[in-house]
Image: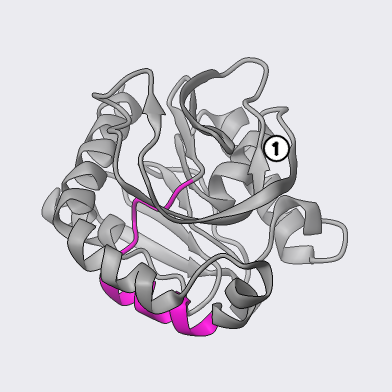
Amino acid sequence: MTEPALILQHGDWGPPGLLADWLRQRAIPFEIHRTWLGRDWPSVEGRAFVASLGSPHSPLDAEREPEVAQELELLRDCVVRETPVLGLCFGGQLLATALGGHVEEAPRPEVGWHEVASDDLDQIPAGPWLQWHYCRFTVPPTARQLAASPSGAQAFRQGRHLGVQFHPESTIEIVRDWAVKDQERLDRLGLGDGEALLDAGNGHAAQAARAAFQLFDAFWERARR
């Protein structure tokens, strides 16, 4: 029987979406740890992999947000134990930090549906992917960059770990929720209209879902080695 995966969710607005759909279709059991509820952190021992989702925080908040610092230590424990990690957006930034990279504020936040320049289309399809981030990571020194965009690195792999800057887990329902909750900041930063992002998402949804399942399958193939 496949060991269970552990999903780290950072708010009720950020569910696992397509990642959960993929796990169910592949018959991989999983547990969701909701970090904002303040419960004890679960062990990473005996996990098929650990997935860290998006968050309103960034690794830059580790000194003032205890749960960010605690999750960083958990991912470092995964690295030591060789438990595969799948980092999505914030999770990718935190994984990069755990592996010796760093995170900085992006010169311009990246929000919207964009393709990436992939060096390995089997692992990282071009997209389009939903981007929704205000910080960015550098590729850890021992990792291989797999994709980039004009905004910077978009994906990296180190061994069985994979970090991406975009949101392969996103669904139309997730985009709709973010478009409403983040509209004030989008307006303030001149990043566009939430309704336009939702309309674009309706056009990209089927292709993005296929790309997400391909990305998850490629990660899982390496994670099982």
Q: Which residue is drawn at 79% across and 66% down?
A: 65
Amino acid identity at mark 1: Thr
Secondary element at tag 1: helix
| Chief secondary structure of the magenta portion | helix
Find disc 1 in the rendering and name its residue: 97
Report whether 148 appears left or right of 116: right
16 drawn magenta? no
- Local packing at callout 1 (Cα closer than 10 Å; few below 14, some 14-19, many 20+) is many
Residue stretch rendered in magenta on the structure: 166-181
Q: In which quarter of the image is the C terminus?
A: top left
Q: Where is residue 18 in the image (x, y as percent from the top left)?
A: 26, 59
Q: Residue at x 36, y 72 (%)?
A: 196
Report whether 202 appears left or right of 111: left
Towards the viewer: 36 or 125: 125
Q: Quadrant of the N terminus?
A: top left
Say if residue 12 shows up in the picture.
yes
Q: Position of residue 158 (x, y in %)?
A: 51, 22
